[in-house]
Image (cartoon, helix red, strand yellow):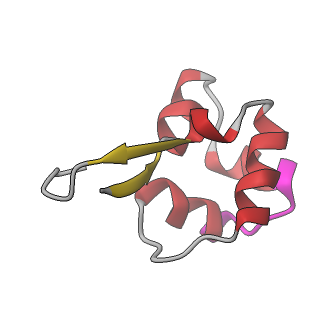
Amino acid sequence: MKIRLRLQEILDERNMSQRQLAGMTNMRPGTINHLCRGNTDRIYLSTLEEICKALGIHIHQLIEQVEDGSDL
């Protein structure tokens, strides 16, 4: 099993930009972009906590398990 962040989906649902989220979390826009595109091989729990806090969601709403062979 692999983990996938639903971050871009959640931002799209809220009509929120990556830059807006970066401002809300005091993270670099590039960091948010990497998380949205899945271009990271590790993520700090504190980063996920800060994103969840800013979006008012639980971590289980942000993370999704996918099969290893999935194109996601």
Using the image as rendered, state which of residue 58 and residue 7 is in the foreground: 58
Q: Quadrant of residue 59?
A: top right
Using the image as rendered, state which of residue 16 and residue 50 is in the foreground: 50
| Residue 44 location (% of width, % of height) | 69, 71
How would you classify the magenta stretch by its main secondary structure? helix
Left/right placement of residue 24 relative to residue 12 reads: right
Using the image as rendered, state which of residue 16 and residue 6 is in the foreground: 6
The region drawn magenta spans: 23-30
| Residue 72 location (% of width, % of height) | 25, 49
Residue ID at (53%, 61%)? 35
| Residue 63 location (% of width, % of height) | 52, 44
Left/right placement of residue 14 relative to residue 3 reads: right
Residue ID at (87%, 61%)? 26
Q: Residue furthest front?
A: 1
Q: Quadrant of residue 10?
A: top right
Residue 59 forms part of the magenta stretch: no
Q: Residue furthest bottom?
A: 41
Q: Quadrant of residue 37?
A: bottom left
Q: Where is 70 relative to 2, above or below?
A: above
Residue ID at (76%, 35%)? 55
Figure disc tally: 0
| Residue 1 location (% of width, % of height) | 30, 56
